[in-house]
Image: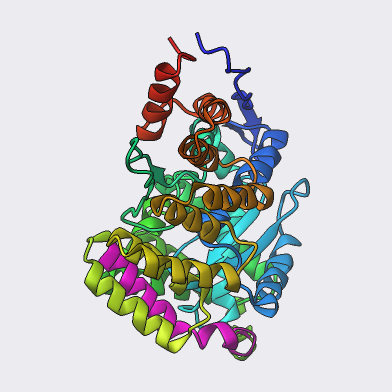
C-alpha cells in the first residue's frame, strides 16, 4: 500500500453518439463539447511547448490569426473559440486540438507562397474541428495519453548518476497528443476546408498548391514530413480531387486573388529565417540518426546566421548534452533561457543539465519556474523527485514520486519512482 497516494486524477469519460455539425448525421464522438474545451485547456499548452512555443514575432502571429478569423466566420460551429499561433518547431506540420487551438510550425509556414495556401492549411485544420474528427480520433486514446503529456525524459538516474536524458525521437517535437486521422477524414477535411476558404474569398487553387507542395517536399525530403503524413495521410488522389473541385465546382474563383504579395510582405521577417530553419531541420535529422557531429555542424551554421534563434540554441544544447559536453550545453541552454524566458523547454533542459552536473538545488529552481509557467507536466514532477532525492530530502522526494505514479505507472521513470518508494518503505 502506498499511503502517500491520493485519488487518481479524473479524466472525462467517453460519450457515445453525437450529431455532426457539418452533415447533421450521427457520429461516434469520444468527447463532449465540454470535454473538448477541457482537453484544449489542459493539453494544448504542453504540445505547443513541445514545439518550442509560439514564435516571438507578434506581427506574424497576428497575421496568421487574422487569416484564421476570416475562415472562422465561415465555419459551422459557433461553440468554439478558435485560436492560431505559429510555433518555433522546424519540422513541417499543422495541427489542431478538438476545441480549435491550432498550431502551425514555422517549418511549414516558410514553405508556403501565398495567403490562399495558408488559408487552405488553416481551413483544413478548421474542418477537422467542425466535422468533430479530432473529438472522434483523440477521444479515449488522447485521454489515456494525458498522463504522459509533455514528458520527454527517460530515467537514467541511479544513486551515483543524476542524469535524466532528453528523449531525441525520430521527429523532435512531435507528440503522442496529436490526433491521427483516417484517409476518409482527410478527404472530408480537404473538401470542407476548400469550401471555407472559397467562402472567405480565396481561390480554390490554394488547396491545390498546398497539396502539390507537400507531395513535392515529401519526394525531396521524406523525413521532414514524417510526422505530418503520419497524422494527415497524404496521397496524389487528394491533390487530384482538390484540383477537380477547383476546375468544376469552384471554377468561378479562378479570378480571385491569392494575396501572394500580402503574404510575402506580412511573413517577410519569418521567411528571412528560412536558411536558419533549414539548417535546424538538417541538424534535427542528424540527431535522429545520432550523428551528433553532423548535427552540431548544422546548428553551428544556424547560429552563425541567427545567434538569437531560440530553437537553434535549444537544439544545440540538446546535441551537446547527448555528447556529454555538459558545460558547453549549459551555455546554449542559458542563452535559450535568456532569449525566451517564458518558454518551458529551455527550463526543463537547463534543469536536466544542472542535475547532470550535480547541482540539484539549482535544478529544482528551474523545475519550479517551469511549473509556474506550464503546470501539469508529469515529467517535471518526476524530475523534482530526482532533485529532492539528490538533496537528501527523502520525504518531499517520495511525495513527488507518488504524484508522478498517480499520473502514469508505465515507463522507466515510473519504474524508478516505484523502486525508490519501495526502498523507502512507502510502497509494498
Please name whichever residue, 166 or 226, is drawn nearer the observer in this view of the structure: 166
Choose between 199 and 28: the one closer to the eye: 28
Magenta part, dominant SS: helix
Residue occupying the point 50% across, 53% down: 351
Colouring chosen for the image of the structure: rainbow
Q: Is 270 on the left-hand or right-hand side of 322?
A: right
Q: Is residue 5 magenta?
A: no
Task: Give residue 381's position: percent from left, percent from top.
Answer: 55, 38
Q: Which residues are magenta?
A: 263-287
The percent position of residue 52, horizontal first and vertical second, equals: 53, 62
Q: Is residue 252 left or right of residue 2?
A: right
The vertical placement of 392 against 46, above or below, is: above
The x and y percentages for residue 307 are: 48, 83
User: 367 above or below 333?
Assistant: above
Residue 389 lies, in percent from the top left, at 48, 34
Would you say residue 264 sits in the magenta stretch? yes
Quarter holding the C terminus is top left
Give the residue displayed 56% in from the left and 28% down from the top: 403
**Front residue (pair 312, 328):** 328
Amino acid at each position: 500500500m502506498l499511503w502517500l497516494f491520493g485519488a487518481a486524477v479524473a479524466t472525462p469519460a467517453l460519450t457515445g453518439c453525437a450529431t455532426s455539425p457539418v452533415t447533421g448525421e450521427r457520429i461516434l464522438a469520444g468527447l463532449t463539447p465540454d470535454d473538448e474545451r477541457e482537453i484544449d485547456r489542459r493539453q494544448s499548452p504542453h504540445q505547443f511547448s513541445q514545439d518550442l512555443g509560439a514564435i516571438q514575432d507578434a506581427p506574424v502571429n497576428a497575421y496568421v490569426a487574422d487569416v484564421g478569423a476570416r475562415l472562422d466566420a465561415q465555419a459551422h460551429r459557433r461553440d468554439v473559440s478558435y485560436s492560431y499561433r505559429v510555433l518555433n518547431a522546424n519540422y513541417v506540420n499543422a495541427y489542431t486540438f478538438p476545441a480549435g487551438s491550432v498550431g502551425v510550425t514555422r517549418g511549414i509556414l516558410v514553405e508556403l507562397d501565398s495567403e490562399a495556401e495558408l488559408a487552405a492549411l488553416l481551413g483544413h485544420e478548421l474542418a477537422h474541428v467542425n466535422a468533430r474528427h479530432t473529438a472522434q480520433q483523440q477521444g479515449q486514446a488522447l485521454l489515456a495519453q494525458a498522463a504522459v503529456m509533455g514528458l520527454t525524459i527517460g530515467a537514467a538516474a541511479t544513486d551515483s548518476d543524476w542524469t535524466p536524458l532528453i528523449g531525441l525521437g525520430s521527429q523532435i517535437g512531435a507528440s503522442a497528443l496529436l490526433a491521427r486521422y483516417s484517409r476518409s477524414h482527410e478527404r472530408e477535411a480537404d473538401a470542407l476546408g476548400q469550401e471555407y476558404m472559397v467562402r472567405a474569398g480565396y481561390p480554390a487553387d490554394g488547396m491545390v498548391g498546398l497539396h502539390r507542395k507537400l507531395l513535392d517536399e515529401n519526394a525531396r525530403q521524406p523525413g521532414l514530413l514524417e510526422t505530418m503524413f503520419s497524422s494527415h495521410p497524404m496521397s496524389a488522389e487528394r491533390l487530384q480531387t482538390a484540383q477537380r473541385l477547383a476546375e468544376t465546382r469552384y471554377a468561378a474563383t479562378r479570378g480571385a486573388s491569392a494575396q501572394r504579395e500580402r503574404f510575402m510582405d506580412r511573413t517577410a521577417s519569418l521567411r528571412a529565417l528560412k536558411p536558419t530553419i533549414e539548417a535546424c531541420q538538417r541538424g534535427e535529422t542528424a540527431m535522429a540518426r545520432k550523428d551528433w557531429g553532423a548535427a552540431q555542424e548544422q546548428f553551428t551554421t544556424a547560429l552563425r546566421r541567427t545567434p538569437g534563434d531560440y530553437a537553434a540554441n535549444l537544439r544545440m544544447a540538446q546535441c551537446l548534452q547527448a555528447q556529454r559536453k555538459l558545460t558547453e550545453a549549459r551555455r546554449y541552454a542559458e542563452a535559450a533561457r535568456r532569449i525566451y524566458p517564458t518558454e518551458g523547454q529551455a527550463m526543463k533542459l537547463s534543469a536536466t543539465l544542472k542535475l547532470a552536473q550535480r547541482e540539484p538545488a539549482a535544478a529544482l529552481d528551474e523545475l519550479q519556474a517551469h511549473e509556474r509557467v506550464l503546470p501539469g507536466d508529469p515529467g517535471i514532477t518526476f524530475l523534482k523527485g530526482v532533485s529532492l532525492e539528490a538533496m537528501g530530502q527523502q520525504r518531499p522526494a517520495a511525495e513527488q514520486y507518488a504524484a508522478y505514479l498517480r499520473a502514469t505507472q508505465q515507463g522507466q521513470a515510473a519504474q524508478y519512482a516505484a523502486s525508490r518508494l519501495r526502498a523507502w518503505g512507502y510502497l509494498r
